[in-house]
């Protein structure tokens, strides 16, 4: 069987994702990642150079997958928040990975900065507002959409309601809250 570098890289990204989710960057071991990917450690270093670079590649890959699942729509922030909520509820791993990153290396990468700045710039352009206000709006929208997974299950559903029903109720609340933010901070009526 011929060596397939793209397949090897994909397996390393998947194995890295699982390892980083479980133990974070500091606790992750390239040897375990390589074993799970069915490659040797040298292949992991060949493709990524370091454990930190592999972590960044995993973050970039997962954020791309999230962006595909919840495309940014500056003209419909409530719809975007709902789609982001859905994507994070379906696969909370990217949010957990981001929590590990914030704990262990809170410095934003150039890609992260660009992703946030470009979204704020699109909001600023669409609504004819300044970048400071647009940035605030984006951070509030993201916070609202991400809060469900950041809250312990017993707090977000203290009465043990049907999980699917409770999830839908919260999604409705997310969209309503972002609608209120849009109306208040962006002058939408």
Image (spheres, rainbow, N blue to C red):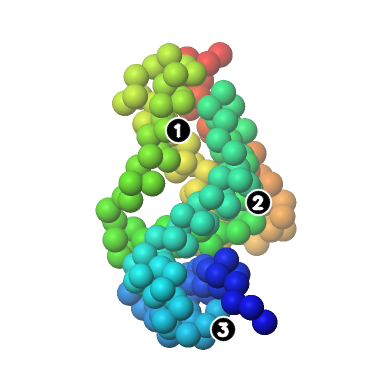
Frontmost residue, 152 versus 93:
93
Q: Circle 2 is placed at which residue position?
A: 167
Q: Residues within 10 Å of mark 3 (few under 14, many from 20)?
A: some
Frontmost residue, 141 versus 97:
97
- Residue 114 on image: x %, y %: 38, 39
Q: Which circle's residue, 3 or 1, is located before the other in the chain? A: 3
Q: Circle 1 is placed at which residue position?
A: 119
- Residue 168 on image: x %, y %: 68, 46
* In this view, the mark in front (3 or 1): 3
Q: Is residue 127 above or below residue 60?
A: above
- What residue is at 61 percent from the left and 45 percent from the top? 68
Q: Quadrant of the N terminus?
A: bottom right
Q: Which circle's residue, 3 or 2, is located before the other in the chain? A: 3
Decide if residue 76 is on the left or right side of residue 137.
right
Q: Circle 3 is placed at which residue position?
A: 38
- What residue is at 44 percent from the left and 19 percent from the top? 125
Q: Is residue 44 above or below residue 101?
A: below
Q: Residues within 10 Å of mark 2 (few under 14, many from 20)?
A: some
Decide if residue 160 is on the left or right side of residue 150.
right
Q: CA distance from mark 3 to mark 1?
A: 38 Å
- What residue is at 57 percent from the left and 66 percent from the top? 6
Frontmost residue, 38 versus 98:
38
Q: Which circle's residue, 2 or 1, is located before the other in the chain? A: 1
Mark 3: secondary structure: loop
Q: CA distance from mark 3 to mark 2?
A: 37 Å
> Are circles 3 and 2 on residues that touch, CB within 8 Å?
no
Q: CA distance from mark 2 to mark 1?
A: 26 Å
Q: Which mark is residue 175?
A: none
Camera sees residue 133: yes
Mark 2: secondary structure: helix
């Amino acid at each position: 069987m011929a060596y397939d570098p793209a397949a090897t890289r994909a397996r390393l990204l998947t194995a890295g994702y699982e390892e980083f989710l479980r133990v974070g960057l500091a606790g992750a071991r390239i040897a375990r990642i390589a074993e799970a990917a069915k490659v040797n450690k040298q292949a992991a270093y060949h493709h990524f150079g370091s454990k930190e670079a592999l972590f960044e590649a995993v973050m970039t890959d997962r954020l791309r997958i999230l962006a595909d699942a919840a495309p940014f729509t500056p003209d419909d922030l409530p719809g975007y928040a709902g789609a982001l909520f859905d994507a994070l509820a379906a696969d909370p791993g990217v949010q957990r990975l981001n929590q590990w990153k914030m704990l262990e290396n809170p410095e934003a990468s150039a890609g992260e900065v660009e992703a946030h700045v470009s979204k704020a710039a699109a909001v600023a352009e669409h609504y004819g507002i300044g970048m400071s206000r647009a940035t605030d709006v984006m951070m509030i929208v993201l916070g609202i959409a991400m809060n469900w997974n950041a809250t312990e299950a017993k707090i977000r559903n203290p009465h043990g309601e049907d999980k699917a029903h409770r999830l839908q109720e919260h999604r409705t609340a997310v969209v309503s809250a972002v609608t209120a933010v849009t109306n208040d901070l962006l002058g939408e009526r």
